[in-house]
Image (cartoon, coloured by chain):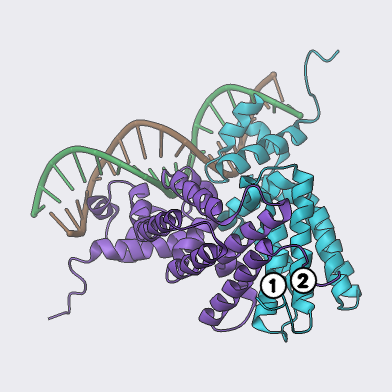
Chain colours: A purple, B cyan, C green, D brown
Amino acid sequence: MGSTPRRGDTRQRIQDVALDLFAKQGYEKTSLREIAEQLDVTKAALYYHFKTKEDIVLSLFRDLSEPLDELIAWGERQPRTLETKQELLRRYSAALTGVEPLLRFMQENQATVRELSIGQFFKDRMIAMSGLIRDPDAGLTDQVRCTTALFSIHASLFAMQTIEGDPEEKRQAVLEVALDLLAQAHAPAERLGDR
Amino acid sequence: MGSTPRRGDTRQRIQDVALDLFAKQGYEKTSLREIAEQLDVTKAALYYHFKTKEDIVLSLFRDLSEPLDELIAWGERQPRTLETKQELLRRYSAALTGVEPLLRFMQENQATVRELSIGQFFKDRMIAMSGLIRDPDAGLTDQVRCTTALFSIHASLFAMQTIEGDPEEKRQAVLEVALDLLAQAHAPAERLGDR
DNA sequence: GTCTATAGTCTGATAGAC
DNA sequence: GTCTATCAGACTATAGAC
């Protein structure tokens, strides 16, 4: 038994290969033929499991959508304190761990994702996160600090590739910098001594 | 005179329309037919001015390549001091001003640009900039600070869209935060007092 | 410098047999 | 659940007239 590999997990295999190719060479440049060939099935087999090409992408994003929605809902129930914002960043960082290929795909194919119905969804979520983190009445510089804090966590997975080191250690370092930025945005007046 | 508009500037007009459409809907989703239609010429006319579709993109990037190369060359001639790095950030921020649509296109079509011969060029330049800004022997957190400083300038054009305000004021605010991050990465030990 | 016409290829998607 | 066969439409790119 087992000489005929994989039966019944075709749907999962399609998702795996699709995400891999989408992240590697982009959504548009990846054809269904290519995905099918790599799985040794035909295009028609793909259409049994997914209605359209876009449907494959939608299925990939389901794992990311729920944790993100829960995080925002949690944030909206909390008092708008520095501690809440810091916890938001910590949870956000944790939520993104393990979905790096998906994030990379989203990051590198923004133009595509934007028109892919899932695009508006994530735009709304980023605006919501931004609204929870920064204070519209604060100074411009402090707003930039907060936005940079949020964005640095988001971007760390691709921007920090030139830095060597253990991924988890890097994640902690990014989180530390982000929390610092947040604290500075909420500090009274004096910052780095003189300067 | 002037009733027959635009003669001889077709090449420039192609570049303008192409960049606009590429930035708006992505490189792959923009066909040469679409560009030609918007200019009221035929596809063949496009091929008179540009050898391929990729060639249009290459021509767009020429304005950005030279200032960036000069900046890196300048940086490599300077002593590796905090002042040099701060000046690098200032010049980098200035160099990016005015080419926002091009940057947005590059940002949102990374997957495409990466395979477009110009991709390796910019990857090399970003690595070079990163090498000038951060110190590989410094602590992980300080390296993240430096990378975030560089990246925040780069990303400010799209990440800060939720913040209201004059673009130039926002640019200054981003620069201030970036310079702060740089200074903190080079500060001795004590940071924000207690915290 | 710009046109028409078209070659040649690939795409996402469907119908129907097994 | 996977196959073969095929669709209509879109694409980049070229040849050659004007």
Tell me the quarter of the image containing the C terminus of chain B: bottom right
Q: CA distance from mark 2 to mark 1?
A: 7 Å
Instruction: State the residue at coordinates (46%, 53%).
Output: A27
Residue denoted by label 1: B145
Residue type beneath disc 1: Arg
Q: Is residue B132 above or below residue B157?
A: below
Instruction: State the residue at coordinates (72%, 87%).
Output: B137
Of A98 and A56, nearer the camera is: A98
Of B10 and B73, nearer the camera is: B73
Q: Residue furthest bottom?
A: B137
Which chain letter matches label 1? B
Would residue A186 be seen by someone viewing this image from the given angle?
A: yes
Residue type beneath disc 2: Leu
Which quadrant of the structure image shows residue B90? Answer: bottom right
Viewed as shown, does residue A117 lie left or right of B24?
left
Viewed as shown, does residue D6 lie left or right of A81?
left
Counting residues from the start of the chain, the first of labels 2 and 1 encountered is 1
Would residue B133 be seen by someone viewing this image from the given angle?
A: no
Instruction: State the residue at coordinates (59%, 56%).
Output: B110
Viewed as shown, does residue A104 lie left or right of B20?
left
Instruction: State the residue at coordinates (40%, 54%).
Output: A73
- Relative image position of residue A132 (x, y in whole percent): 53, 54
Q: Is residue B104 above or below residue A183?
A: above
- Relative image position of residue A162 (x, y in whole percent): 64, 75
Tell me the quarter of the image containing the N terminus of chain B: top right
Of B20 and D15, nearer the camera is: B20
Which chain letter matches label 2? B
Report helix, strand or loop for mark 2.
helix
Count every numbered label the image shows and give the total.
2
Residue denoted by label 2: B182
Of B102 and B87, nearer the camera is: B87
